[in-house]
Amino acid sequence: MIPIVRVGRTELQVTRLGLGTAPLGDMYTRIPEPQAEATIQAALDNGIAFFDTAPLYGRGLSERRLGAVLPGVPRDRYVLSTKVGRTLRWEGPPTGAPPDPIGVVFDYSRDAILRGLEGSLRRLGVDRVDIVLIHDPDDHYREALDSAFPALAELRSQGVIKAIGAGMNQWQMEADFARHADPDCFLLAGRYSLLEQGALKFLSLCQAKGIGVFLGGVFNSGILARGTQPGAKYNYADAPPEIVARARRLEEICARHGVPLKAAALQFAAAHPAVTALILGAESPEEVVENLHMRQLPIPPALWEELKAEGLLEESAPVPAGG
């Protein structure tokens, strides 16, 4: 049984594990339609009732693949999160911000937010989503704060959506949004993991303000899931030597304690009390089941003690119960 928790100060509840669907947008490899649909179904069958997507993932492909499965499921059985601000080119205005190479325009205006959300609903085949996140506004801070957040807050006040926030690969701007906007939650990808804990102050800020945090990228693009094999990825690219060396030390200590590196990475990320849920990507039903198994593997307290003693974990970083 996967625990169910409340998102920040809202009444919305999610399972502590969610399915991230960027891989189902063929982010890393081309996935056959039957396999993608079976992956979504496996999540549902195994108690995962929280799905995160975005128009950016495969230029609408991950949303369409969810739309092939979820409309057949009672709407109150799952929570659905998507993103706005990176609008598919064919849904954008004839003029405006230049498109990036993967077919989206960066547009955080109110009109673009509403138009983007309409497109997502159409691809998803549902009449509502629960959570809407502003997607990667790194170079669009003022537009996000002055246009996107107010547009989403209006939809939230109307009951159209239940929670709003931002999804980013950095915590610094999310911390600023926490202070100057009114978010319910954030999705932070890759910046709090066994490899790096620089976001500890951000997590404490969210905890103090009652803002929910979803962690994505807890395997840092794969190196903490597949280990330091040749071609290991970190932050969406080939891992640099210093990251490989650090990951290898983690790998060796985990091996001494008989713990898979992936299990340690998953359970460590979930242990911080500010973390509402982990968003774990999967490319197959088997990967969904494996993630659930890794979540439940026993880990001896001595592992966490050694990782801290070796300086691989921040001393103040919370570890799973018993550590």
Image: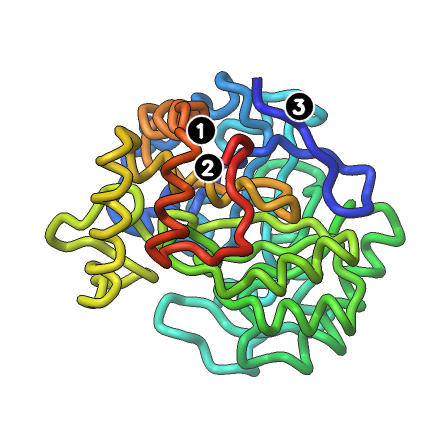
* Quadrant showing the N terminus: top right
Residue at 58% over, 46% down: 272
The picture places residue 144, in percent across and down from the top left corner, at 67, 74
Q: Is residue 51 left or right of residue 40?
A: right
Amino acid residing under circle 1: Arg
Which comes sooner in the sequence, label 1 or label 2?
2
The picture places residue 62, in percent across and down from the top left corner, at 44, 44
Structural distance between the alpha carbons of marks 3 and 2: 25 Å
- The kind of secondary structure element at disc 2 is helix
Structural distance between the alpha carbons of marks 1 and 2: 6 Å
Q: Is residue 110 left or right of residue 17?
A: right
- The kind of secondary structure element at disc 1 is helix
Residue annotated with mark 1: 295
Residue annotated with mark 2: 267
- The answer to which quarter of the image holds residue 99 is bottom left
Which comes sooner in the sequence, label 3 or label 2?
3
Query: Could you say which is closer to the camera, residue 258 or residue 171?
Result: 258
Q: Which mark is residue 77?
A: 3
Q: Residues within 10 Å of mark 1 (few under 14, many from 20)?
A: some
Amino acid residing under circle 3: Arg
